[in-house]
Image (cartoon, rainbow, N blue to C red):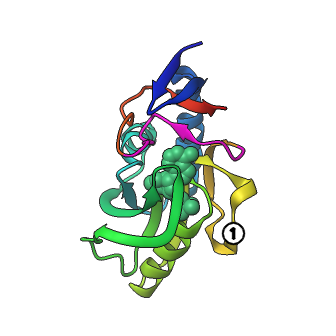
Amino acid sequence: MRTIDEQGYHFEEWLTPAEIARDVQQVADKISADYQEKEPLFVVVLNGAFVFAADLLRALKDIRCEVTFIRVSSYFGMRTTGQLQFIVPLQQVVDNRDVIIVEDIVDSGLTIHQLKAHLRAQGATSIRVATMLYKPNKMEYDDAVPDYVGHEITDEFVIGYGLDFDGFVRNLDAVYKVKE
Ligand code: IMP
Ligand code: MG
């Protein structure tokens, strides 16, 4: 098993690249089936979701779609600050669009809760959420439960495949879990 040491913490490989690829394909197949008659607009939440989004969008089958990006931040180190900042605002009109938010991980649900309110206010027809990882035990908002999930995880902090630790290690090709 591969391991990484980062900022004094020890991490062990938890999802291999092959396992991630399977999870991504399964999510892509569900979205492809659900959006056959639609032209969804994918809203990718930067920075973390860029790796998942790149794989997910290329795994879709026969879907005509658009993709745009938004950058938000609620995290500092291993903890959420509870306050969502729109660092790069939405640049695309979402009025009358079927929107699919693409996230790396849904934790408390704060990001999705606030983002959904924002997109709803801008007139989106429908809003669904696709996330690589989901921490169901930590969910605090009814409207933030993701519709498409690559893999569920308990409360541990994870890095890699887009997920950072203070900005670093997003480039790891696997998901690593912190070990006490
Ligand atoms: P939420 O708003 O509490 O759902 O947090 C969502 C955001 O927190 C994600 O988009 C990530 O950027 C970050 N996050 C949550 N859990 C982790 C983790 O285990 N590792 C790295 N980032 C995380
Ligand atoms: Mg994120």
The extreme front residue here reads 8
What residue does disc 1 label? Answer: 140
Using the rendered view, name the quadrant where residue 66 is placed. bottom left
Query: How many numbered callouts?
Result: 1
The answer to whether the residue bearing label 1 lies less than 8 angstroms from the nearest atom of ligand 1 is yes
The kind of residue on which mark 1 rests is: Glu
Q: Position of residue 69 (x, y in %)?
A: 31, 60
Helix, strand or loop at label 1? It is loop
Image quarter where ligand 2 lies: bottom left
> Can you say whether 39 is above or below 105 in the image?
below
Q: Position of residue 116 (x, y in %)?
A: 50, 75
Q: Is residue 30 highlighted in magenta?
A: no
Q: Quadrant of the C terminus?
A: top right
Q: Is residue 166 left or right of residue 132?
A: left
Badge 1 crowding class, 10 Å Cα cut-off, few under 14, some 14 to 19, many 20 or more, is: some
Q: Position of residue 168 (x, y in %)?
A: 36, 38
> Can you say whether 45 is above or below 170 in the image?
below
> Viewer-proximal residue, 79 or 60?
79
Q: Quadrant of the N terminus?
A: top right
Which residues make up the magenta segment? 154-166
> Viewer-proximal residue, 23 or 125?
23
